[in-house]
Image (cartoon, rainbow, N blue to C red):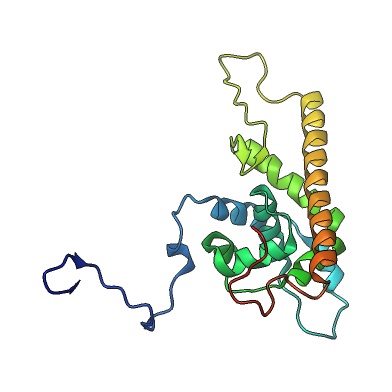
Amino acid sequence: MWKMQGMKTFKPYEPDQILLLPPALQDWLPKDHLVYFVSQVVDCLNLSLITDQYEEELRGFPPYHPSMMTKVLIFAYSQGVYSSRKIEKRIQEDIAFRVLAAGNMPDFKSISEFRRRHLNAFKDIFVQVLQLCREAGLVRLGHVAIDGTKIKANASKHKAMSYGRMVEEEKRLKAEIDEMTQKAERADITEDKEYGSDKRGDDGLPGTHVRP
């Protein structure tokens, strides 16, 4: 404990202290935090539509892991964060994003390029994530509305969602995901024009940041 003469005692606070042991990412957030659910759901899915595109790329630097990029984008969009620049900033400063990225620090150009290159596959995976969320009984995934109606066996003649209802729900989810990816594209285009395609917006300007 630390105490000044005649003053209140406070818990230790040493900003420059060096950690003797590496921190465990799992200790940074509550065990029931949404990022862990998103991570587990994506890990259950087949990402071959994305990963197969890298199979013949033998030159250049290794790309960021598709699973990590997919998780970060799904979580970001579900939180209403669409700009690739803002996602980059969140990965650097927001604990939830840092946990998903697991030490990776993709820049905004890598983030936007991943979305554009794998747009159709990403949207299909996003739909599957939301469908699994619905099956798990979630009503919402962040800002994204999900049909989380739970039908009790003794309160309904139907044991599960009808086929027609499932088709309508899938159309709704696809439309919502289309809207989110379009918002992301518009945000990136707007910020490219405002800051320059190679600038994040706070480059070399102390105390200034990309608008939240």
Q: Between residue 191 and residue 40, name the one nearer to us.
A: 191
Say left or right for 92 vs 181.
left
Q: Residue at image x 65%, y 36%?
A: 134
Instruction: Check the image and report above or below for 138 versus 153.
Output: below
Say left or right for 18 vs 117.
left
Residue 19: name its quadrant: bottom left
Instruction: Check the image and report above or below for 192 versus 161.
Output: below
Instruction: Check the image and report above or below for 92 versus 142.
Output: below
Q: Residue at image x 47%, y 49%?
A: 32
Q: Between residue 203 and residue 118, name the one nearer to us.
A: 203
Whether residue 55 is visible to the viewer of this picture, yes or no, is: yes
Residue 186: name its quadrant: bottom right
Quadrant showing the N terminus:
bottom left
Q: Residue at image x 67%, y 31%?
A: 147
Instruction: Check the image and report above or below for 34 versus 50.
Output: above
- Residue farthest toward the left in the current orientation of the protein: 6
Say left or right for 182 vs 208.
right
Whether residue 67 is visible to the viewer of this picture, yes or no, is: no
| Total numbered circles | 0
Relative image position of residue 190 (x, y in whole percent): 83, 59
Relative image position of residue 175 (x, y in whole percent): 82, 39
Q: Between residue 33 and residue 67, name the one nearer to us.
A: 33
Residue 155: name its quadrant: top right
Relative image position of residue 10 (x, y in whole percent): 22, 67
Relative image position of residue 199 (x, y in whole percent): 77, 74
Quadrant showing the C terminus:
bottom right
